[in-house]
Amino acid sequence: MSTEGVQAVFLETHNWGKAAKFFQSLGFELEFATDHNSGQLRNGTGPSLFIAEVPEDQETRMRLVLGTTTEDTNLDLVQPFEDTHYGTREAVVRDPDGREWILQAR
């Protein structure tokens, strides 16, 4: 399996509004916002930044999304490829140090 590099950064926050304003102050532009406290920003032609609000009692995470054109993998699968509600197919793999990475197939 090979990837096409970082496609996106998935970031969880306890306050969508504050997080969006923070990244906008760093030059990111809002591409879209949802009606459930999340949205996508981008700075130039770089990877997108998708931010989703989670409850205060939930630990926040940040994960990188790597693009791929194939679903063949012999990596440590945490979650196999499946359709998402936003129109992609994604899997989650674990690296040798235990970090989770999202693979997004096109």
Image: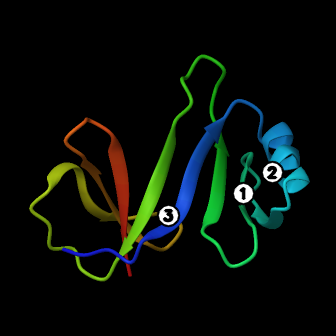
Give the numbered dot on residue 85.
3
Q: Tell me the CA gap for discs 2 and 3.
A: 25 Å
Which residue lies under the disc numbered 1? 39
Q: Nearer the viewer, mark 2 or mark 3?
A: 2
Height in image: 32 above or below 23? below
Mark 2 residue element: helix
Mark 2 / mark 3, whichever is N-terminal: 2
Q: Could you tell me which residue is drawn at 83 percent across and 66 percent down? A: 29
Q: Tell me the CA gap for discs 2 and 1.
A: 12 Å
Give the quadrant of the C terminus.
bottom left
Residue 30, given in percent of the width and then of the height, sits at 82, 64
Residue 96: quarter of image? top left
Determine contact: label 2, label 1, CB under 8 Å.
no
Q: Could you tell me which residue is drawn at 66 percent across and 20 percent down? A: 56
Q: Nearer the viewer, mark 2 or mark 1?
A: 2
Q: Amino acid at mark 3?
A: His
Q: Work out whether residue 54 or residue 69 is closer to the camera in this orientation and state it.
A: 69
Mark 2 / mark 1, whichever is N-terminal: 2
Residue 50, given in percent of the width and then of the height, sits at 63, 56
Q: Amino acid at mark 2?
A: Phe
Residue situated furthest left in the rendering: 74
Residue situated furthest top in the rendering: 57
Mark 1 residue element: strand
Q: Residues within 10 Å of mark 2 (few under 14, many from 20)?
A: some
Q: Tell me the CA gap for discs 3 and 1.
A: 14 Å
Q: Could you tell me which residue is drawn at 75 percent across and 68 percent down? A: 43
Mark 3 / mark 1, whichever is N-terminal: 1
Report whether 104 appears left or right of 41: left
Report whether 14 appears left or right of 60: right
Which residue lies under the disc numbered 2? 23
Height in image: 30 above or below 50? below
Q: Nearer the viewer, mark 3 or mark 1?
A: 1
